[in-house]
Amino acid sequence: MTIPAERLDQIANRFAELEARMASGTLEGEAFVQASRDYAELEPVAKIANEVKAMRAEIAELSELVSDPEMKALAEEELVELKAKLPEAERRLAAAMLPRDKADAKPAMLEIRAGTGGDEAALFAGDLYRMYEGYAAERGWKVEPVSISASDVGGYKEIIANVKGTGVFAKLKFESGVHRVQRVPVTESGGRIHTSAATVAVLPEADDVDVQIDPTDLKIDTYRASGAGGQHVNTTDSAIRITHLPTDTVVTCQDGRSQHKNREKAMQVLRARLFEKQRDAVEGAEAEARKAMVGSGDRSERIRTYNFPQGRVTDHRIGLTLQKLPQILEGPGLGEVIDTLIAEDEAKRLAAMEE
């Protein structure tokens, strides 16, 4: 894909303008925050655009030198090398210029729920949570549980966690969907392989600017928290249930002993879910186009299988199979799967631009 020279100039001029504004010392408050965001977003694009511009200029100079008998051999050699490198640089620039999801830079709310498979599904949900913890740790992100519903046998019926760091949603957003496991459960005496599943949902974390919630639209109930097996976590009504009446969205939190903290965490989850509903409504017209890309993000879509007997992980959306199940479940190995998904999505969006 060839980017017009005029577009390269526009990028350079816009970046220079942002640099001047940032250095002026006149920006304050929200204006400074917005300019900082714009600068951070444009900086990698401007860097690649400068590379492309410099390569094109050098190719033009070398093309003139070819007519000089003394410089011809050297110029032709360098021309071949540069012309081979230019298309890749232009592809990287086109990829950097692709429209970005405004939520990509945000932290994320990670929700994992045990699906079909009973106790084994809950154990698998625990495996998935530890996998994301390991992946987050490698990237320097912080994972904070918000709501936990533990299973009697270990693992989780449901766990919701906040993943904080730079660009979390951009990396994790393709993890939404049904994850399936094939293995011999610890409770299986006959050695038969069972198939169980857990559902993962990744939502961008929303703040008060993203979602305005009218307090009169909320129904808030308090109740006594109870843990696995029915025992009471404490003897006060610290658990919180919040219902957003206009959308009938219900969020509960009973982990902490403080009603105030449980309410705070529940509101955090509620904002994320309402923000996702808003995004779905806005992007509804593009739903079919998104399905043609890497997965639809639909939570009912079966996206990946973890096969223990064969030691493999298969991502069904892109036909990727890796014989690295232990490394992936430990966390660091998940990076290869995620990076391949992002690259595939990028390639398909570039192809769509060229049609």
Image (cartoon, rainbow, N blue to C red):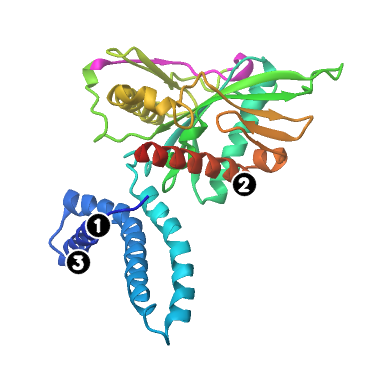
The mark that comes first in sequence, 1 or 3, is 1
Q: Which residue is rendered at x = 60% and y = 14% of the image?
A: 230
Which contiguous range is marked in magenta?
A: 217-231
Residue 135: % across, % down:
57, 44
Say if 221 sits above or below 52 in the image: above
Give the number of callouts.
3
Give the labeled residue for mark 1.
Answer: 11
- Mark 2 vs mark 3, CA separation in Å: 39 Å
Which mark, by number, is residue 332?
2
Query: Which kind of residue does numbered mark 2 sit on?
Result: Pro
Residue ID at (27%, 56%): 39
Q: Could you classify mark 1 by the number of other residues whose Cα lies within 10 Å: few (under 14), some (14-19), or many (20 or more)?
A: some
Query: Observer-nearest residue: 354 or 7?
Result: 354
In the image, residue 326 sits, relative to residue 85, either above or below, namely above
Q: CA distance from mark 1 to mark 2?
A: 36 Å
- In the picture provided, is 293 more to the left or to the right than 58? right
* Above or below 50: residue 7: above
Give residue 23's mark: 3
Q: Quadrant of the C terminus?
A: top left
Asked if one can make out residue 72 in the rendered structure from this viewpoint, the answer is: yes
**Residue 286 has which mark?**
none
| Element marked by disc 2 | loop
Residue 218 belongs to magenta span: yes
* Mark-to-mark CA distance, 1 and 3: 18 Å
Q: Secondary structure at mark 1?
A: helix
Q: Amino acid at mark 1?
A: Ile
Relative image position of residue 300 (x, y in whole percent): 51, 18
Per the image, label 3 sits on a secondary structure element best described as helix
